[in-house]
Amino acid sequence: MAEIKNYTLNFGPQHPAAHGVLRLVLELDGEVIQRADPHIGLLHRGTEKLAEQKTFIQSLPYMDRLDYVSMMANEHAYCLAIEKMLGIEVPIRAQYIRVMFAEITRLLNHLLWLGCHGMDCGAMNILIYCFREREDLFDMYEAVSGARMHAAYFRPGGVYRDLPDSMPQYQASKIRNERAIKKLNENRQGSLLDFIDDFTQRFPALVDDYETLLTDNRIWKQRTVGIGVISPERALNLGLTGAMLRGSGVAWDLRKTQPYDVYDRMDFDVPVGVNGDTYDRYLVRVEELRQSNRIVKQCVDWLRANPGPVITDNHKVAPPSRMAMKSSMEELIHHFKLFSEGFRVPESEAYAAVEHPKGEFGIYLVSDGANKPYRLKIRAPGFVHLAALDELSRGHMIADAVAVIGTMDVVFGEIDR
């Protein structure tokens, strides 16, 4: 009798559960995965090379487009690296605003992950629930930066502008009558801080709703318990970070171990898993939703009581105020010079990392003293996690490969940069 050989199957890049342009070449014995070979290189945006032709400030919007689910988290690392090279002191109010929006970004990321991961495994309703809350979070982005996604709000030395005193209002239309609009605008009558505060009070009950749908659902547990198990030792050896590492029981979080901005003033817990499987990583991320909400609330309370500047007064790095430009030709010229020529960074190198929603996101910058980076290297957590995909999926079924991809929370903008 002839020996039956393994066969190979392409998974993606057009597969809806591939989370971007991931192409997996699966070697199968029947429906059991013997080997999973991830192929990247189908997006290739060339961000690192593009940055060499742009001034330091012009490269900032590229950061939003890396992991396009965690926009301000990417900006955060880039700004920290530049500030380290320039030796700039960031005003304390700007640091609180950054931390608040970094955690709002974590909520945005984890809600998209939860909705998509749930849907990949067959749970439909969770996506609609999560997108309902994302709408409010996008409104916060829009109120502060003018853009719902690609904000370009963090700047070297602080943030672009202070928090607005009013929230945009919904307008009546043919689709929505006055009564419906009034209900939509109920929590938009005050400032952005009032709107965020209202959200932090509502959100814990909404997370309870997500858990009601999934946590004890027997189908969800069948799809995730014991799938993609990784030991703490292997997770560390493979360079996993974020929830991928904490799910295996390693309490490593840069916000605690190497705090930046005002994270050392924040009171929050670092959730860890026990079994290192897909279900534990789900529980870790759900608890992170609750902890991020706690941090946002602490920032709101502090920002209400403490006005102040939101960007450095070093005008070699930050533009002068609008008022100053209107009264001084020198300041006006300086404004144009800053945005056309940029600023020069002394000959140096720096690495800055943040606890990105997906893991450790790092920016390594080298300057030769010019107004453009000599070299920009991005340490994307998803790229490292993808290397573990083969190990995590061996011995599982094809359907489990979808759960393993989901548990990694990969976004290809940062992987094939």
Image: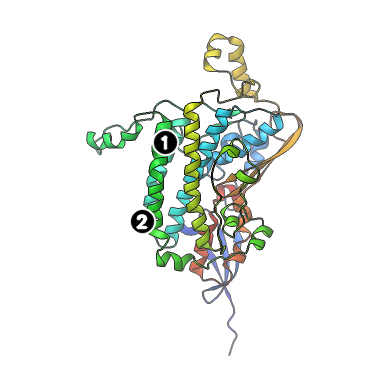
Query: In the current view of this chain or complex, which residue is farthest to the bottom?
Result: 1
Viewer-nearest of discs 1 and 2: 1
Q: The disc labelled 2 sits on which kind of residue?
A: Asn
Which residue in the protein does label 2 denote? 125
Kindly state the secondary structure of the residue where label 1 is placed. Answer: helix
Kindly state the secondary structure of the residue where label 2 is placed. Answer: helix
Nearer to us in this view, 325 or 114: 114
Mark toward the start of the polypeptide (1 vs 2): 2
Residues under numbered marks 1 and 2 in contact, where contact means CB atoms less than 8 Å apart: no
Q: Hey, which quadrant is residue 114 in on the image?
A: bottom left
Q: Residue at x 34, y 29 (%)?
A: 189
Res. 121 visible in picture: yes
- For residue 110, above or below residue 184: below
Left or right, residue 179 beside residue 79: left
Nearer to us in this view, 81 or 92: 92
Q: What percent of the width, then of the height, locates residue 101? A: 51, 37
Which residue in the protein does label 1 denote? 197
- For residue 20, above or below residue 230: above
Left or right, residue 28 beside residue 257: left
Nearer to us in this view, 186 or 16: 186
Q: What percent of the width, then of the height, locates residue 401? A: 52, 65
- C-alpha gap between disc 1 and disc 2: 27 Å
Neighbor class of circle 2 (other Cα within 10 Å; few <14, some 14-19, many 20+) is few
Q: The disc labelled 1 sits on which kind of residue?
A: Asp
Q: How is the image coloured?
A: rainbow
Neighbor class of circle 1 (other Cα within 10 Å; few <14, some 14-19, many 20+) is some
Q: What percent of the width, then of the height, locates residue 396? A: 54, 71
Nearer to us in this view, 132 or 147: 132
Q: Residue at x 47, y 48 (%)?
A: 290
